[in-house]
Amino acid sequence: MIVFRHARRAAILSGALSLVMLCAAHVGSPDAFFDGKAGPYPVRVIIRSPTVIPARAEIVVRVTGSGVQRVTATARAWGTGEANAPPPDDAARVAGDSTLWTLQLWIMRQGSFAVIVHVDGAAGPGTVTVPYTAVALGVLKMNRGMAVVLSAVGIFLIAGMLTIIGAAAGEAIETPGEAPGEDVRRRARKIRMRGAVLILAILVGGRIWWMVEDRTYTEQVFRPAAARVTVRVDTTTRGGRTARAGKVEPHTRILRFAIDRSVASQRSWVPLVPDHGKLLHLFLVKKDGLGAFAHLHPIAIDSLTYESSLPFLPPGGYFVFADVVHENGFAETLVQSVTLDTAPAMAWKPSDADDAIFTGNGVRSPSRFDDGATLSWDGANGAHARGADAGLRFTLRDATGAPMRVQPYMGMSAHAVVVRDDGRVYVHLHPMGNTVGIGTMPAMESELPGEFEFPWAFPKAGNYRVWVQLKHAGIIRSAAFDVVVNETSTTGNR
């Protein structure tokens, strides 16, 4: 019975993760977003990640169902049973918005968590599990003004302590009203000096301890694993055999993505597992103007090396973002860059059927396909501000304007990639939230509605491009949209 109970819990957790694993597939966008249902209640959950760990993460829950009376949440670490999880904390309703609730949860260590949100209301109880990856992204520095104040207070306290020690060893042992003799004053000075040495030793020891702790923590701050990206020309014949001298036919360019083996061993590398059926999602984005985009799924040569047939892309420098998920649920984005030369004329044979590319500029809305169908960004004309709902709602229509349906593309109705023009913000989104699935994706309908939304908020102001990918009639379609994000919502958008 005990074995069955543990197996059942593991199956439930694994199933939840395979459906809605929140992904750290991002650069410069640490917050997590999720859209789904807690029983009968539609909910949107936003997890505002802290910069350091341990710290409190802010949990924002929007419940659009009626009659909601109570919202609670708790953060359960990966591998922690229900009995060892902290009790849930109550969320407070935000004044002026009856659908919005907020609370803060302590995140005590780095790693994978399940944030369990429970809703009680007129329609009964409902629960949703939102997996979340917590990492320390930096080290907090003390404010200079605070450092000066604390130093002054410390000097004052040390001087007072030495004064008390000297008085206790001198005047305190004399008869009241009598002046202490020279021998008493000499002894008081000696004891005061010994006290100063002891205090100095304590301060030096504390400083050494703090430096060791700071160094240890700094080493634990999250840094993506190092990797190397190279490109070579495959010199095999179209039949796959090595050509004889003088008869070499360039077949295609091969892009190799190799994770640094030394880094993997130092960090106790945890093996990768499929995310939407792929061990590696590789994105190439042209640096100059963001005018070219490729979404590739390299084939594993070994556990740390992956290769993909490289499509024709305009020459120049490219950002390279590689999304991976580890066996322990930890997801990360490895960042690199590569420079592509002019490619020789050759046909591209994708390494994976889900590989796709897009070249050209972004539009406002809509984006038009060759058959007359359009993909409209329904919120493109609104003002976009840092930290506000991005409003990434899209609708696919045919040439007559009628809504269309799509086929699942790697288990989802659509995928979106958002990149700021300097490459400092990158995120890979899905309509359920910025989610990835561990293992094989569950079976889905043959067709899905061609209307979808990617819950997210732009973390910084700047110029962005949004690529949306979907599948219709067996063909992967890609569209690009441009947006300017302002610091505040009072400034208009282009």
Image: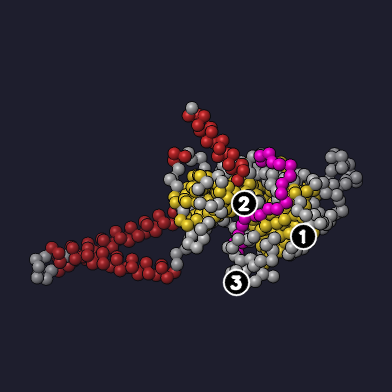
> What residue sits right under mark 1 in the picture?
367
CA distance separating discs 2 and 3: 27 Å
Image x and y of residue 399, in percent: 82, 56
Q: Is residue 174 left or right of residue 26?
A: left
**Residue visible at 55% across and 44% down in the picture:** 39
Please report the bounds of the magenta region as a residue range.
441-460
Q: Can you tell which quarter of the image residue 457 is in?
A: bottom right
SS category of the residue bearing label 2: loop
**Residue visible at 66% across and 41% down in the picture:** 441
**Residue 281 sits inside the magenta stretch:** no
Amino acid carrying mark 1 in the image:
Ser
Q: Can you tell which quarter of the image residue 490 is in?
A: bottom right
Mark 3, Cα crowd under 10 Å, few <14 / some 14-19 / many 20+, is few
Mark number, residue 433: 2
**Which numbered disc flags the more N-terminal residue, 2 or 1?**
1
Tag 1 near tag 3, CB within 8 Å: no
> What residue sits right under mark 3 in the picture?
490
Residue 467, relative to residue 130: is it above or below? below
